[in-house]
Each structure stands twice: as structure tokens, then as C-alpha cells.
Amino acid sequence: MFLIKDGKVIWTYNTGKGPEFDDVWMLSNGNILFSRMKYVALITPDKKVLWKMDFKVPQGADHTEVHTCQPIGLDKVMFVVNGLPAKLCVVNYKTGKVEVEHELPFNKQPDQQGIHGQFRRARVTVQGTYLVSYLSDGRIVEYDNDFKPIWSYDTPKPWAAIRLKNGNTLITDEQDWLTREVNSKKETVWEFNCKTDLPAEYQFTSAPQTCTRLANGNTIFTSRGQNGKGPQMIEVNKNKKVVWVLHDWQTVGDGTAVQILDDPGIPEIPGQSEH
């Protein structure tokens, strides 16, 4: 992980070799919550581990993974466990109490070898609903507090979906290399295709996985960049004009998740951070 200010890296956190990073949050108190496929952890700015939950990543009958997390206030975390069965959980990491644990149904249930692709991003919305990206099932589903589906959207390979402050949903599809903003009626109100809408000099070399919508209306896309062959992040405005590019493999690595720390809003309050 890298903390960047004025174009310079001012803090890093290295967890060593192993499974992928997928989600990261800096909270208002400076602590950082993140997922690393085989665990979810909360650390302090001075790199002390405050809380950690491990998962059984090695292949086997009890194989599980975690690719998404979200702080709920300063004492709770929501995360989704890939596995058989897959589950959405909310844990109070101060008390250790599991407050929510609910199985997530699949249309095309994978075998044990296929759980890696079950889920990526999931988010608690400002209304308290759960917006879940079924990567291998080709759909986004929003559940109410009783886990009844109240909204859905089909797309081939959704890596991430976030509920915007205007009520629309911003979806990033890894297979189609595009990010699409849709309203509650599932109508497209804005779309950016990273294969066809980016100028040749800024082309990604791997599909975008997540994005964030800024307060000024611009959107930042992230990419893993194929070990230096392409940029890690690109920011575009509403008119699809590129306004900023991060292509720096000397000091930072793959771009999977980004949080803009000077955007307004308290990150641990659902709906205030759109990353």
C-alpha cells in the first residue's frame, strides 16, 4: 500500500509476498482496513495490527477467501467470504461479536476450485442495504436487511459496483473493460470504455477492476498494468477527457484500489466514500 501526497510516496505498508490486495480504507482516525485474500486486517498508521481475521486460502474442502471489506463506523467491518457456502458478514472487531452472517445464493454455484471468482466488491449503502458484485455469476444484486433482493443488474464480469450519492450505481466490468453508470431503472446515464474511449498514449494494458467517483464528478479507473507496460490509474471528466494519469513503476505497483483522501465525507459512514 502507498500513501501519496503531492506526487510523492510518504508512507508504505508491505505485507510480503502472497495473495492479492483487493480493498483498502483509511478511516477518519488514520487506521487502515484492508483485505488480502487470505485475511482482513486493521492497522494503525505506525503499522500495529489492531485486528485480523484469517481465511483458509490453500485449496481444500474448507477453502475460503476474502476480497472485499468496508468499515461500518469505527468498530465494525463488513466483508464477504468466498466459499461453499459464500457468506456476507458484519463483525464488531472491538467485541469480537459476529453481528451478521448470511449465505449468498448463486445461480451458477462453482465447485471448490472455482470459489476464487465468486465475489469481489461489496458495499453497504447509505440506506443500509448490501450491494454485492457476483463476479463469476455475471450480476450485481442489492439486498435489504433481510437479504431479500430488491435490485439487480446483469453484466458479464462485474468486479465492482458502488452506489453514488445521486442514487445511481457505478459498475466496473472486467470482461468488457468498461465502467457504466446506471439509474434505478437500469438505464445507462454515462459509460466509459477503456478500450475505445482512451487515447492510444494512455491505453491500459490490463482491464480496469475498480473506480472511484470524485466530488467534482470526475472518475478514476485503476489497472494492474502488466508489470509496467501500462498506467496504473487514469482520471477522466464527465466529457471523457483524460485529466490525470499515474504511470509510475519506480515507486508504486499495481493499481487495484484507490481512495482519494481529500474528497469530502467520513469514510466509515456508508455512502460518504464512493470508492
Image (spheres, grey):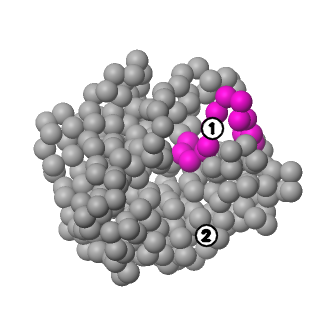
- At 36% across and 75% down in the image, what residue appears? 110
Estimate the x, y position of residue 144 in percent, counting from the top left: 28, 67
Q: Nearer the viewer, residue 198 or 240?
A: 198
Q: Please, which residue is most extreme toward the right here?
A: 200
Circle 1 SS class: loop
Crowding at label 2, few (<14), some or many (≥20) Cα neighbours within 10 Å? Answer: some
Estimate the x, y position of residue 7 in percent, counting from the top left: 69, 26
- Taking the image as shown, residue 213 lies to the left or right of residue 125, namely right
Task: Work out whether mark 2 precedes mark 1 in sequence or the reverse, and give the earlier one.
Answer: 2
- At 73% across and 55% down in the image, what residue appears? 205
- Taking the image as shown, residue 246 lies to the left or right of residue 213, namely right
Examine the rendered structure and indicate whether residue 227 appears above or below residue 172: above
Examine the rendered structure and indicate whether residue 191 appears above or below residue 187: above
Circle 2 SS class: loop
Q: Please, which residue is most extreme toward the bottom here?
A: 107
- At 39% across and 44% down in the image, what residue appears? 35
When asked about the image quadrant of residue 147, the answer is bottom left
Q: Amino acid at mark 2?
A: Gln
Question: Is residue 133 in view?
Answer: no
Estimate the x, y position of residue 204 in percent, counting from the top left: 74, 54
Q: Which residues are magenta?
A: 245-258
Question: Is residue 109 in view?
Answer: yes
| Residue at image mark 2 | 175
* Magenta segment includes 224: no
Q: Amino acid at mark 1?
A: Gly
Q: Majority secondary structure of the magenta segment? A: loop
Q: CA distance from mark 2 to mark 1?
A: 22 Å
| Residue at image mark 1 | 253
Q: Are marks 2 and 1 in contact (CB under 8 Å)?
A: no
- Taking the image as shown, residue 111 lies to the left or right of residue 183, namely left
- At 34% across and 59% down in the image, what residue appears? 59
Q: Which mark is residue 188?
A: none
